[in-house]
Image (cartoon, rainbow, N blue to C red):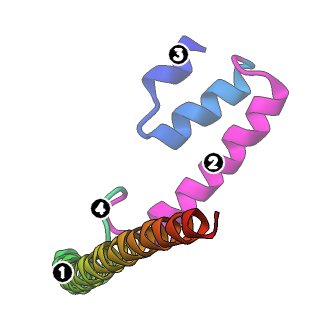
Amino acid sequence: SMLQMKNIVDMSQALTAMVDASVVSSSDASKLQAFIQGSQRDASDDAEPGAPAAAVYESKSGNIVETLESLKEKADAQLDEVRKTETSNLHNYEMLKQSLEDEIKFANQDLDKAKKTLAESAEIKSTAEGDLQ
């Protein structure tokens, strides 16, 4: 087995030698053979195994930068919209608060007038009852 290892030039030959020498189990051997066959096909397709073909690799950083800029623009637009909505909601709240405070103020004035009128009516009634006796 060690004699075979000295004559091995590439990885596929090494894996084949391991399978032949029964260093690996039979289930692993079938997986290794499939891997070897796949890598041999890949190696025959490429002049340099492991190096990507020129047409396969293209710089995608421009698209990434454009995507990030687009996402930032969308986020800024959403932030502006949310700020406008928040400002509008705050204004509406302040208006409602002022309206309710005014309503409470006028209701308390009406209540005071009603109590005063009731007290005057009670006084007039008691005076009238006193005059009847």
- In this view, 45 is above or below 69: above
Disc 4 packing (10 Å; few <14; some 14–19; many ≥20): few
Secondary structure at badge 3 equals: helix
**Within the image, what quadrant is residue 17 found in?**
top right
Coordinates of residue 87 in the picture (x, y in percent): 20, 80
| Residue 108 highlighted magenta (yes or no) | no
Main SS of the magenta part reads helix
Q: Is residue 109 left or right of residue 69?
A: right
Query: Is label 2 or label 3 in front?
Result: 2
**From mark 2 to mark 3, how far is it between C-alphas?**
24 Å
Marker disc for residue 51: 4
The three-letter amino acid code for the residue at tag 2 is Phe
Asked if the residue under mark 1 is in contact with the one under mark 3, i.e. CB atoms within 8 Å, the reply is: no
Indicate whether 65 appears above or below 36: below
Can you say which quadrant of the picture contains the N terminus?
Answer: top right
Q: Residue at x 52, y 66 (%)?
A: 122
**How many residues crowd mark 1 within 10 Å: few (<14), some (14–19), many (20+)?**
few
Q: CA distance from mark 3 to mark 4?
A: 31 Å
